[in-house]
Image: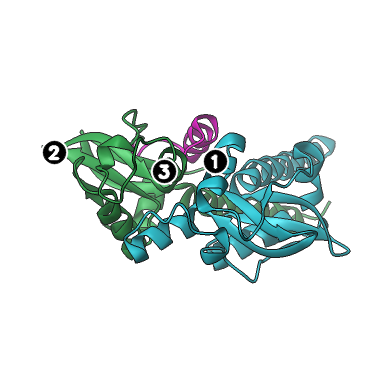
Chain colours: A green, B cyan
Amino acid sequence: MSNVRKILESKPGTVWSVAPDTPLVDALRLMAEKKVGALLVRENDQIVGIFTERDFARHIIRVESPSEQTPVRQLMIERVYVISPEEPLEQCIALMVEKQIRHLPVLENDKVIGMISIRDVIKQAIEEKDNVIHNLEDHIWRNPT
Amino acid sequence: MATVKSILDIKGGVVHRVAPGNTIQAALQLMAQHNLGALLVMVGERIEGIVSERDYVLKVADSGDLCLDLPVKEIMSYPVYFVSPEESLDACMALMSDRQIRHLPVLENNQLVGMISIRDLVKSIISEKETTIKGLENYILGRQIAH
């Protein structure tokens, strides 16, 4: 299979991020507006966390006196798994399945160049495997015994 | 071609559900407890809707309020897209992509027999296609050796 860069080529776009002290409701509005399930949390150009729909739904019920103004910092995940654009898709799928995550920021020379979701990865993987299957079948068809 | 049934055979048919009048807070607790992204909203054996993390995010974004005490019927999605156990995994993936959903209840003769998620599909589709490719490669190799 090909690599992460291939996905980014067919899915150019901004990686949306917020600051750690952003009120929850503003982060959720950004997600809804941009139709994304995850935001990077950045402070002084450093990645300090990732904030996803999953983390919000899981952790809001554990926050003491939660409010729509609760800062993202309290609900973000600080351990951010990242991937390089040269990483093969298999590696990407394995990481997402193992860590139970749906989003991976893509880093090249310490710069964020994209974010890929489990949906992007599976779409690309299916397309490529279908191509291989098609080619193999074609080869059999063209070379009768 | 692998079907939905092959996934249910491995993961089982338990589907977690809430009543339409249960609070969002209660639904989120159930999701957290069972590590799920969506719950079916049911009255008896009747499916009224489906409630997912995404539905909740959109509600808070829209209302500007955490709404934890609202009943889930206020945020659930319906009608609910579902599949049969005989459906192919590719068809399920296509439905999830088209509708931008991550969960599909499985119905057989109008009876709920399970629920599959995008994560279940990822694992199965990849390994199934891998097996097909191996099989075709072996077939070609076998023919070449036979020659």
Residue A69 percent coordinates (x, y): 25, 49
Label 1 and label 3: CA atoms lie apart by: 23 Å
Residue A52 percent coordinates (x, y): 38, 45
Dot 1: few (<14), some (14–19), or many (≥20) neighbours within 10 Å? some
User: Which chain letter matches label 3?
Assistant: A
Report the residue at 42% width, 56% height from top: B67
Label 2 and label 1: CA atoms lie apart by: 35 Å
The amino acid pointed to by label 1 is Gln
**What is the number of the mark on residue A103?**
3
B130 is higher (above) or lower (below) than B88: above
**What is the number of the mark on residue B73?**
none
**What is the number of the mark on residue A45?**
2
The numbered mark, 2 or 3, whose residue comes first in the sequence reads 2
- The residue segment tinted magenta is A84-101
Q: Are marks 2 and 3 on the same chain?
A: yes
Report the residue at 54% width, 41% height from top: B29
* Residue at which label 1 appears: B29
Residue A119 visible in the shown view: yes
Given residues A144 and B126, the one toward you in this image is B126
Given residues B21 and A129, the one toward you in this image is B21
- Element on which disc 1 rests: helix
Closer to us: mark 2 or mark 1? 1
A137 is higher (above) or lower (below) than A58: below
Report the residue at 57% width, 48% height from top: B27
